[in-house]
Amino acid sequence: MPSTSRHCERSEAMKFYSTNNQSPTVDFKEATINGQAPDKGLYFPESIPKFEKNFITNIEKFSNEEIAFNVIAPYVGDTIATDKLKEIVSETINFPIPLIPVTDSIYSLELFHGPTLAFKDIGARFMSRCLGYFVGRGQTVTVLVATSGDTGGAVANGFYGVEGIEVVILYPSGKVSPVQEKQLTTPGKNIHALEVEGSFDDCQQMVKQAFADEQIRKKRFLTSANSINVARWLPQQFYYLFAYSQWPDKGHPPVISVPSGNFGNICAGLLAQRSGLPVEHFIATCNANDVVPKFMETKKFEPKPAFPTLSNAMDVGNPSNFVRVLELFQHEIPGLENIFSSVSITDKETTDTIARVFRQYQYTLDPHGAVGYLGLETWLKSHPRQKGIFLETAHPIKFPEAVEKYTGSALTVPPSIQGILDKKKVSTRMPANYSSLKDFLMSRPEIIMQ
């Protein structure tokens, strides 16, 4: 189980163990390259660094680059040189991450100002640069990833043209938005999209089977770019500290509502809180896929097939990162309940919220942000002295039909999206069975970068 320690020095080698406890501990480099532990568990830090009190008290005096480096350095240890890690951090967060007041008590943390207009940009950019640093010349690594929407585009953008890296993205046919699909099917070069005739859970299961297949692993060096990978998961802590840096009432920590699907995002926030970030409470706001809200009621984790909703990136019926949430609290539910709750929001409630917030406050929510907003608003009604932040995880332009219909207002297309809308989608369609993916991976030649 993880222990709590003082803020680690760079020279110390942070170790990561498997949540299944049947694999050797590894450092950040090996955890990043492996993606998943050999025993099929997820890597988790042996110790949780504590932020120095001076760092939190004076957080407004630090730049975002300094904050992010301070957060990630203990986990990376000596696997990346200090100057190179600072460069990676700087390139990861070189876009605005503003905290915007919507009402007197509700603030939006806008995470959609990166190149693919989604919160996944931070994790994908950090991981791609770390993996590119770790992979030696002459080697080829296949990044195999399932996406329910935004991960695919962020991974495609982050890894595009990285030497020695081939990316294979599985996504559920007809269950991602048109903009999301264009982002992951149009890059070309070292990015290949597989359009699976099934759900995100089907895609995720196919990926897991590939990692467990020794025949494939002998032919291809596989790693993952989903949030199961520590290099994707851990940097998501950054923006929680950026939010607190901008939080106007330091004497009263915020409640934070996180639109949740695979639970890597909120788990990163909980990890930052355990390290010393002041947060009053976390709300995992889910759509109709309510496995975790049900767990918090019954204390039984019962995965079920994903149900398609407007907030498609959260359509996950078996959230793999929830085991990390439990690990963080040593599987003691009372401790988890003190800081964490979870609610389910319907599509009707989502669209009503989009319409109402635009009408009352002239703020445009995407469906995921609307889920987060309503979860927070509901909490604050029964805790009127508190204030909070919801994470606006994707730009509304990714869901134009729903957003424009319920706001009655046309969206402006950002320049970063305009260029891909006319590009031709290029994907390989396949049924939702593992043999199809295995055939693809076994027959695909090694990639040669130009």
Image: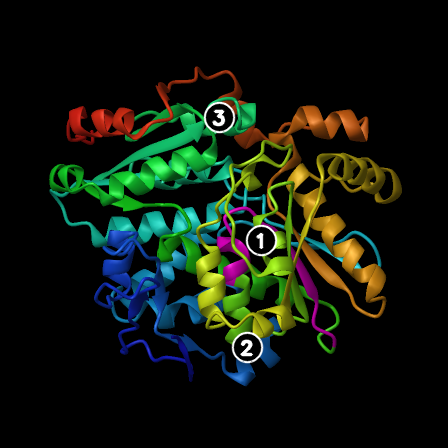
**Neighbour class for label 3 at 10 Å: few (<14), some, many (≥20)?**
many
- Check disc 2 and report the residue beneath it: 276
* Front in this rendered view, residue 125 or 1: 1
Label 2 SS: loop
Q: Amino acid at mark 3?
A: Glu
Queried whether the magenta region covers residue 260, the answer comes back as yes
- Check disc 1 and report the residue beneath it: 292
Does any portion of residue 238 appear in the rendered image?
no
Scheme of image coloration: rainbow
Left or right: where 421 falls relative to 362: left
Queried whether the magenta region covers residue 239, the answer comes back as no
Quarter of the rendering containing residue 168: top left
Residue at image position (76%, 49%) is 374
Above or below — where is 191 with respect to 117? Answer: above
- Check disc 3 and report the residue beneath it: 181
Q: CA distance from mark 3 to mark 2?
A: 38 Å
Above or below — where is 255 with respect to 119? Answer: below
Q: Amino acid at mark 1?
A: Val
* Front in this rendered view, residue 322 or 50: 322
User: What span is in magenta?
Assistant: 252-268
Left or right: where 4 falls relative to 144: right
